[in-house]
Amino acid sequence: MNRPQRDEAMVREAGISLDRALFPLLVGIERSGPIGVVDLADRVGRDYTTVSRQVAKLESLGLVSRQAGDHDRRVRHAVLTPKGKVMTDAVDAARERMGREIFANWEKQDVADLVRLMQKFAADLDGDGDGDRPDQDT
């Protein structure tokens, strides 16, 4: 799912026009924002200067704005604008449609097993030690 071709398919399915390099940044800002460029660069595994230029591009498109940080006014955080939220909502809807297509022919138990195992994987990856907890509602 983390291949650039998947991002392109998601953008097409969402019916939006956005460079594929900007797509993960916009979604990252929506999921983690307000967020500083250094933190965002670290999360997406890109160079700070590259991400800074790309966030500036998102800002010029009216999808994000930058605001002073709460704890340090010198640090500027990227925040999703209402226009950016409309775009990420379209992406979320596209992701939902694409997921439904993928799982349409799966047995319900197979989907439940996948959800359980992905929750376990995520918990263990985060190191919170809850990877062995029983199934939870999702």
Image: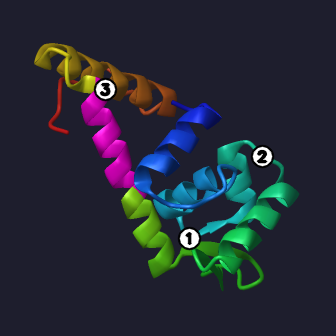
Image coords of residue 107 (percent x, y): 14, 14
Q: Amino acid at mark 1?
A: Pro
For the point 73% across and 52% down, the residue is 41
Image coords of residue 126 (percent x, y): 49, 34
Res. 55 mark: none
Q: Which numbered mark, 3 or 1, is in the foreground of this view? A: 3
Question: Where does label 2 land, which residue?
Answer: 46
- State which quarter of the image contains the C terminus: top left
Element on which disc 2 rests = loop
Q: Amino acid at mark 2?
A: Arg
Decide: few, some or many residues near mark 3? Use Cα within 10 Å; few <14, some 14-19, many ≥20.
few
Query: In the rendered view, does 49 fall on the left or right side of 43?
Result: right
Image coords of residue 85 (percent x, y): 43, 71
**Mark 1 and mark 3 in contact (Cβ < 8 Å)?**
no
Res. 102 mark: 3
The verdict on residue 62 being magenta is no
Please state the extent of the stretch shown in magenta in the rendering. 91-102
Q: CA distance from mark 3 to mark 1?
A: 32 Å
The verdict on residue 93 being magenta is yes
Element on which disc 3 rests = helix
* Main SS class of the magenta portion in the image: helix
**Mark 2 and mark 1 in contact (Cβ < 8 Å)?**
no
Q: Earlier in the sequence, mark 3 or mark 2?
A: 2
Q: Which numbered mark, 1 or 2, is in the foreground of this view? A: 2
For the point 44% across and 25% down, the residue is 124
User: What is the tally of numbered marks visible in this picture?
Assistant: 3
Question: Where does label 1 land, which residue?
Answer: 34
